[in-house]
Amino acid sequence: TEDLTFNDPLTFDEGALAARTLFRETFNADADGVWHAPGRVNIIGEHVDYNGGICLPIALPHRAFIAATPRSDRHVRLVSPQTRDHIDEFDLDTVDRRGTDGEVSGWAAYLVGVAWALEQAGFGPLRGFDAALHSCVPLGAGLSSSAALECAMAVAINDMEDLNLLGGDDDDAGRALLVDAARRAENDIAGANTGGLDQSASMRCTKGHALELDCRDMSVRSIPFDLAHDHLALLVIDTRAVHSHVTGEYAQRRQACEEAAGILGVDLLADIDDEQAALDQLPGEVMRARVRHVLTEIDRTRTFIDELASGSLVGERLDRCAALLDASHDSLRDDYEVTCPELDVAVDAARASGAHGARMTGGGFGGSAIALVDESAARDVARAVADAFAEHGFEAPQFLIATPEEPAGKVAE
Ligand code: ADP
Ligand code: MG
């Protein structure tokens, strides 16, 4: 069989150099600074964010790097390795909601959108800027390459425009504010209807920790998450699958949850405390199954966090956590119906080849799965998944090892 593709992250130095070099080649000047923001992977708590539930992401070592310099006018010039042949240009005075003038689209919307959103939040008028992007977050793999762009841009603007939202005693409050701007950029300018999980992870995770994010009020708690201490690793399997119906299905799931909440007389499904009574009240097996996923997933996430907080991931505690990951996947497959053949094959092959537990992560219908494995077994599990993909005639999967890293910030000179 062919070689496995492991996607290694760039170091801060490598990423900053790549962004600075692109900036210099494009704009014939040195950038004032380089800012970075990570992609994320959610460990457990899937499709609960828009129901007011709890999720548990970590920030990946894979980051977007943006080298930038402010301008004296309101002009924005952007370049990325993917668009090297031309520079995308905008004017901050004409950026507006997609559909109003339709001018900003594609990847630039994620960046210009952040400036727009900060102005909407009252931080304007901002100066324009030149910026060069270099990201090593896999695109469209469910690892939030989009939030990485937005959050790197948000911290860059914070520094360039002296918004003073970061550092000091109010650092996390400032980060929460930048999360809102990044989310609005994605929702209103890029036109993707997503919750705040991705941006919160990229802005508010801390190194060595997972982020307990309560999506009811976006409050957070850092949970120590040190798999290496227990000789474990989190293997991320990028299935390379993107199914075209993903947007429509996502909207349908959200709608089903809203409808169910309406029938049950609650604002959010997370408000329900008697699961059985709630399920008995719902019309139809499909709606019951959707709600059952949300309620059991919130429970699993709470239990998982309690387990993490109570000691090392060894012995029976490891078994219980692994079982929660497995149960999460099974619920997403059977009750929420957001998996796909590639995700199910990845998870089955990982489990069969020695992973302690495995599940899809992110929105589903493609994207990535995670497997909790012994450090020494990561390559063997990856090999087994790649072999299973070859047998099924799927495109070869790609892999990365996820460790909990720093949130968005400025690259030290
Ligand atoms: P995900 O966030 O899971 O990776 P999305 O569909 O939300 O997937 O975001 C992917 C989009 O983000 C891409 O289609 C592109 O517009 C933009 N993007 C992300 N990374 C880059 C990059 N390095 N260069 C240009 N565009 C990027
Ligand atoms: Mg995204």
Image (cartoon, rainbow, N blue to C red):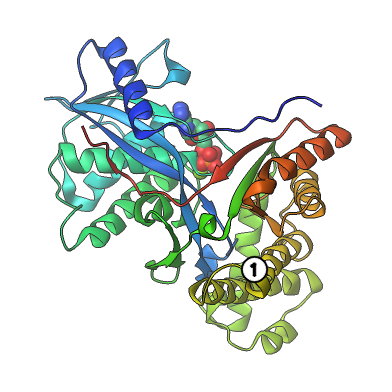
Q: Quadrant of the C terminus?
A: top left
Residue shown at the point (55%, 75%) measured from the top left: 302
Residue 13 screen position, x and y as percent: 33, 29
Q: Quadrant of the N terminus?
A: top right
Residue in front for this viewpoint, 113 or 1: 1
Residue in front for this viewpoint, 61 or 246: 61
State the residue position of label 1: 318
For residue 388, what is the image quadrant?
top right
Secondary structure at numbered mark 1: helix
The answer to whether 407 appears left or right of 142 in the picture is left
Residue shown at the point (25%, 62%) measured from the top left: 173
Count neighbours of disc 1 (C-alpha within 10 A) and say few if under 14, some if 14 to 19, many if 20 or more: many
Residue 48 against residue 407 in the figure, above or below:
below
Residue shown at the point (59%, 52%) measured from the top left: 233
Q: Amino acid at mark 1?
A: Leu
The answer to whether 159 appears left or right of 388 in the picture is left
